[in-house]
Image (cartoon, rainbow, N blue to C red):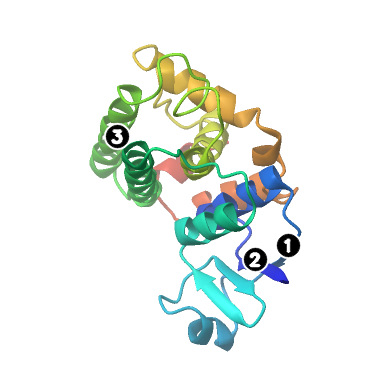
Amino acid sequence: MKLELVGFKICPFVQRVNILIQHKSIPCGVTYLNPKEPPEWLAILSPRGKVPLLKVGDAVLFESQVINEFLDETHPPSLLPADPLVRARERGFVALADDLFGGLWHWMTAKDADKATEAGAGLRHLLNVLETSLHEGGPYFAGESFGLVDCAFAPFFMRLDLLEANGAEALVGAELPRVAAYRKALAEVPAVKASVVPEFAQLYLGFVKGQGGVLGDQLA
């Protein structure tokens, strides 16, 4: 069964899938498209007009979590918990990771200080929720084992690391020790490191600066 991942180089949802592919050493091709000039066939293959897509032979899957659960099921052992209740809880926190990306978008596109402050406050609220939900001993969301929920959060923290290293206001302080330890642990996962193109940092920071927002103006 031939697999091919289709997406954009800086899309966090594409990265989620690539993290799982790297973690499980799944044979899978990767095709990166130009987001400024997407091919006409993208709108035909993607019901929501978005990436990532996973070509599975002649079939096409869409939505990052759906793709990840398919890959997880077809390439055991599973990274999802066996307990249905725990599994459902982790799926819920994948949605929280989605909310973080929504907040990050508002933060990077805010055109004035008040909106930027409001967006930053929204992100801090979500990070506080995460702080109270992470496994006490870590290092990952549910404890010692790396899971699909970690694939969902890792792209957010990679981007936050880049932004803060280049002049953005720090969102994770001493009041969030579990989140601080979690982001550090995720950054050290080999599959996370291998999930982006070599020029990722340059492309992402250029993208943020190109939004013309307050955040971009703060970056070095």
Whichever of callouts 2 and 3 sits on the residue coming sooner in the sequence is 2
Q: Is residue 124 left or right of residue 28?
A: left
Q: Are marks 2 and 3 in contact (CB under 8 Å)?
A: no
Where is residue 210 shown, x and y percent of the image? 51, 56
Which residue is denoted by mark 3 in the rendering?
A: 126
Answer with left or right where residue 205 lies relative to residue 82. right
Residue 157 in percent (x, y) is at 50, 35
Residue toward you, 5 or 120: 5
**Label 1 sits on residue:** 28
Residue placed at 55% from the left, 50% from the top? 16
Q: Residue at x 64, y 71 (%)?
A: 33
Q: CA distance from mark 2 to mark 3?
A: 30 Å
Q: Residues within 10 Å of mark 3 (few under 14, many from 20)?
A: some
Res. 11 visible in picture: no
Amino acid type assigned to the residue bearing label 2 in the image: Leu
Q: Find residue 205 and report its horizontal and vertical position in percent.
A: 58, 46
Q: Residue at image x 34%, y 48%?
A: 95
Question: Residue 116, can we see it?
Answer: yes
Instruction: Describe the element under mark 2 as helix, strand or loop.
Output: strand
Q: Earlier in the sequence, mark 2 or mark 1?
A: 2
Judged by depth in the image, the label closer to the viewer, 2 or 1, is 1
Q: Mark 1 and mark 3: span between their CA atoms?
A: 33 Å
**What's the amino acid at mark 3?**
Leu
The answer to which image quadrant residue 30 occupies is bottom right
Q: Which residue is mark 2?
A: 5
